[in-house]
Amino acid sequence: MLLKTHHCGALTKANVGETVVLNGWVQRRRDLGGVLFIDLRDRSGIVQIVFNPDFSGDALNVADRARNEFVLAVSGKVVERDAATINPNLATGEIEIQVTEIEIMNPAKNPPFFIEDGIEIDESLRLKYRYLDLRRPEMQRTLMIRSKAAKIFRDFLDENGFLEVETPILTKSTPEGARDYLVPSRVHPGEFFALPQSPQIFKQLLMVSGLERYYQIARCFRDEDLRADRQPEFTQVDIETSFLSQDQLLDMMEELTVKLFKETTGADIPRPFQRISYADAMGKYGSDKPDLRFGLELQDVSDIVAGSGVKVFASIVEKGGQVKALNAKGCGSWSRKEIDDLGVFASRYGAKGLAWVVLKEGEMKGPIVKFFTEQELEALKERLGAEEGDLLLFSADTKKVVADVLGNLRLKIGRDLGLIDENEFKFAWVVDFPLLSYDDEAKRYVAEHHPFTRPKEEDLQYFDTDPGQIRAQAYDLVLNGYEVGGGSMRIYKREVQEKMFGALGFSKEEAQEKFGFLLEAFEYGTPPHGGIAFGFDRLVMLITKRSNLRETIAFPKTASATDLLTDAPGTVDDKQLEQLSIRLALKQAASKA
Amino acid sequence: MLLKTHHCGALTKANVGETVVLNGWVQRRRDLGGVLFIDLRDRSGIVQIVFNPDFSGDALNVADRARNEFVLAVSGKVVERDAATINPNLATGEIEIQVTEIEIMNPAKNPPFFIEDGIEIDESLRLKYRYLDLRRPEMQRTLMIRSKAAKIFRDFLDENGFLEVETPILTKSTPEGARDYLVPSRVHPGEFFALPQSPQIFKQLLMVSGLERYYQIARCFRDEDLRADRQPEFTQVDIETSFLSQDQLLDMMEELTVKLFKETTGADIPRPFQRISYADAMGKYGSDKPDLRFGLELQDVSDIVAGSGVKVFASIVEKGGQVKALNAKGCGSWSRKEIDDLGVFASRYGAKGLAWVVLKEGEMKGPIVKFFTEQELEALKERLGAEEGDLLLFSADTKKVVADVLGNLRLKIGRDLGLIDENEFKFAWVVDFPLLSYDDEAKRYVAEHHPFTRPKEEDLQYFDTDPGQIRAQAYDLVLNGYEVGGGSMRIYKREVQEKMFGALGFSKEEAQEKFGFLLEAFEYGTPPHGGIAFGFDRLVMLITKRSNLRETIAFPKTASATDLLTDAPGTVDDKQLEQLSIRLALKQAASKA
């Protein structure tokens, strides 16, 4: 067997005169008057190999049988190309190989799509033939960058004293385990393991163990309602530390993030990252993961319109709702149709209507203008920095709906107006998340993050008066409108934990039942601790500028949680089920569906 | 909050005069005449902190409340100890901290066992309170070495062009999936994912993808019959390469192994590792994972005893069995009781009896001696290198039983005689495993490794004549009697694969049904490839000289596959099962059990 001495894509003029052995796949072949040119591809790139009766002898006849994607082993001499045939588009374009020996290592059927970048075929075909899809250079580059990104994370964390610890994948269903994948136990009939939604409990236990700095690039699982860009199993860089303040932790994570992006994209990202409170993010951008690459900030105009003749505005403000506006700079010339389309877009996010005003020819125009006083119009103009040619869009509803509507309109208009620099990586920390939110159905507060999130020291007082006002020591790292990481400092004091459970309406017994062994662990000397988890798939997606998570995962699942390559999930035989002491209950499922 | 400026165990005389902040746990406290001495522990080690009315002020009163495992934050000055109080057993024994400020970060209940090395308590208590068990220095050291070992693997593989690729954990049940953990799918009622027993299929597909060098420190799952030292989930360093010969791969893996042991244990392990054929390993040591730290090789004496008066020997040889012997050097003086005990031990491995001969006072003695001729005795003596004072042990049975009996006797005697250097790491490659073995029940050949294992080129001829004689390009890495790695070159040629399926008795349709998409993938230009997987838990166990795998895993499961800490597996509520379209079938299970 002829085994490679060199990589195809690594050969240069420096190798001229050397005899090399190459192994690779036929990218394409051309027969020019009895001389055969083959582009041979391996992971490193492509090189041209030449079969000529003058030096190839019988190898030419063998090579003649080769077709696209055949695996070849060739031996030959590296020579300079004639000036006229130099290919400046190819790293190896100045040389070629004069082949003297060949072995067809394996033939290949004609692949169902071309092995090249930018193919436009149905994604399901790519997923079914993922092993061919992964031969395409852009997929190989993505996997290489993914591998490199993992290494950068690990090296940085190792240098900073973090231990890599593996936590169980067969673990226990969490109290609110609605989204847990379950695994029946053969040895313990009727009992189930659960796959972890995150290593949260274990990483906190490792802090109780005094490990101080833990990390793991961890597989996590969530049996979620299907959404466009989620995966049933995903990877997070899971981190937990003891004896650090939130600021110390965020600083260290910033340093890590900057290093990661520098070494994978070359970008120099300035530090410190902007830190924006949850309240400000929602207020200005209508989102807790704002895209900060452009402005178009939302403005609260509730005070201005509260007493206006626009009845719907006035009444919404009166009922505790909100009226906010967005100045779409320079969109005053948009057609009525274009503005109506914005309304349709807004309705997807719950808008019942989309009021608007344009500044045209020195005047404010639009259906609602006549209901405002001159003074109110002036105040709006000033608040929104409105100038000739601007389009002002209004949303009036609950805080949540207004944020959703205008936040999404802001993104759409930012994109439509080309305000976004696609080459910029704009990071920010969103901090001071609310600790609790009131669940109207359950008629109680629920934890926004999780029940072990530490409240801000100065807000502890509100436990007794207004729990909804308590801010958490919780933070998200956002990048270009995506959440790429998030975490919190954890409660480590018993009395704070009791207040938290109290606010959540858990009795001592309930808390014990839900979190028993973790609460017990906390009794034995728990250090102050906190952590973060980075969404690794998402980060790789943003680093490689791919369009969805599936492009960053070697063997992803579809939006309906199937693997088109292996055809998983699949049926299993009754004997397997019997061994697991379970049985299918399909009818009930069908009648529910 | 007083947050650490230094690690407890890292302080030395070089820090004298500095004011430091330390965070850690109370290891122990002593009150000597109103002066309080506390050993403060963190991950790095222990340092003595001192509270004295002269410099501690109110901190002394606060410190007085501290008990074992309280979490303290202290600030104070590093001072040299008096010559008389220097503790040479402590890395920080030359200094101590004069504390001026203290904060009790958290109190602690009295732990159920001491936080120190070498405790002798029931393992189940340690597992239930794993978070306290992991505070013990020997557990922390093990986890640190485990983390370091992973880093060494990764760095070496990265330097050698390997890409880290994550393969799915939610995948498809394999055709012989008896040991698969299954995961019901909520989205696809009646269908199941399976957890991988190894990433075997995916790593081969990655080679089809042209990735050339892949690795992953992969979690694998096996719902096995319970055995003493197995875990339902375990970690392997999974490696696959293209375009390498077996020798090239093994050489590279040797280099990796030597580096791993050098950097974790300091041991200099000579290369190349011994390569011993499966036939030789079984012949000389009765094991395919021989402990080569000592001799005591087995000798085949079938030819000598075949015609002897020991009827049982003669008849076993005649029936195609085997008679082998082991020379227990210098054990000729063992008592009859001791020899009988060997017989009892041997019977555990299937021996129906254990014949023996001693050389005493120039004569061969023992119950069977009289049935041999003088010539036969001389031949035995020569074959076994028997000398005055030796004990010769004989096993006569099928090849398999003889190997089991004498292989285990050899290990026992080697240990009993102290022939084993516990500080030696003796590696070897066991190669040339049989490709197929004949299954008497199924009345067909089965794959010893898996159906894609490549036969040795020179043995291909036996497919048509004697498939049992074919040796595989398969190899195990053994260390001190443990298998620590194993793998094979894979079949990549269609015609060889067809011969293999033919030998296994699979029709084309069966092969298609069992391995469909993989066989299809192989049609599109598969490179010659092969790989290996290291048992990471086992390697860490041997590196750290721990007694079982559970000692190397942060949160292990017991031999009955339960997690005593989280109490997993556990019951789940009916609603969860209903969502998964399954139902318990406990009665059937009970009646089966």
Image: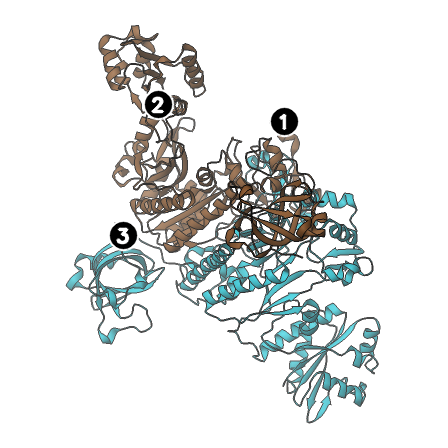
Chain colours: A cyan, B brown
User: What residue does disc 1 label?
Assistant: B591
Secondary structure beneath dot 3 equals loop
Q: Tell me if B527 is positioned left or right of B345 in this view.
A: left
Q: Amino acid at mark 3?
A: Leu
Task: Give percent across and percent down for residue A568.
Answer: 53, 49
Q: Chain of mark 1?
A: B
Label annotation for residue A3: 3
Task: Give percent across and percent down for residue A285.
Answer: 66, 73
Residue A526 visible in the current orientation:
no
Q: Tell me if A428 is positioned left or right of B321 in this view.
A: right
Secondary structure beneath dot 1 equals helix
Distance (Cα) linking label 3 and label 1: 58 Å
Q: Pointer 3 and pointer 1: residues touching (CB < 8 Å)?
A: no
10 Å neighbourhood of mark 3: few (<14), some, or many (≥20)?
some
Q: Which mark is first along the chain, 1 or 2? A: 2
10 Å neighbourhood of mark 2: few (<14), some, or many (≥20)?
some
Q: State whether residue A160 is above or below residue B286.
A: below
Task: Give percent across and percent down for residue B105.
Answer: 68, 51
Q: Are marks 2 and 1 on the same chain?
A: yes
Task: Give percent across and percent down for residue B498.
Answer: 34, 42
Q: Amino acid at mark 2?
A: Lys
Residue depth check, mark 2 versus mark 1: number of the one nearer the observer? 2
In the image, B66 versus A81, the foreground residue is B66
The quadrant where residue A34 appears: bottom left
Q: Pointer 2 and pointer 1: residues touching (CB < 8 Å)?
A: no
Q: Amino acid at mark 1?
A: Ser
Label annotation for residue B399: 2
Distance (Cα) linking label 2 and label 1: 39 Å
Q: Pointer 3 and pointer 2: residues touching (CB < 8 Å)?
A: no
Q: Chain of mark 2?
A: B
In the image, B38 versus B572, the foreground residue is B38
Find the residue positioned furthest to the left: A54
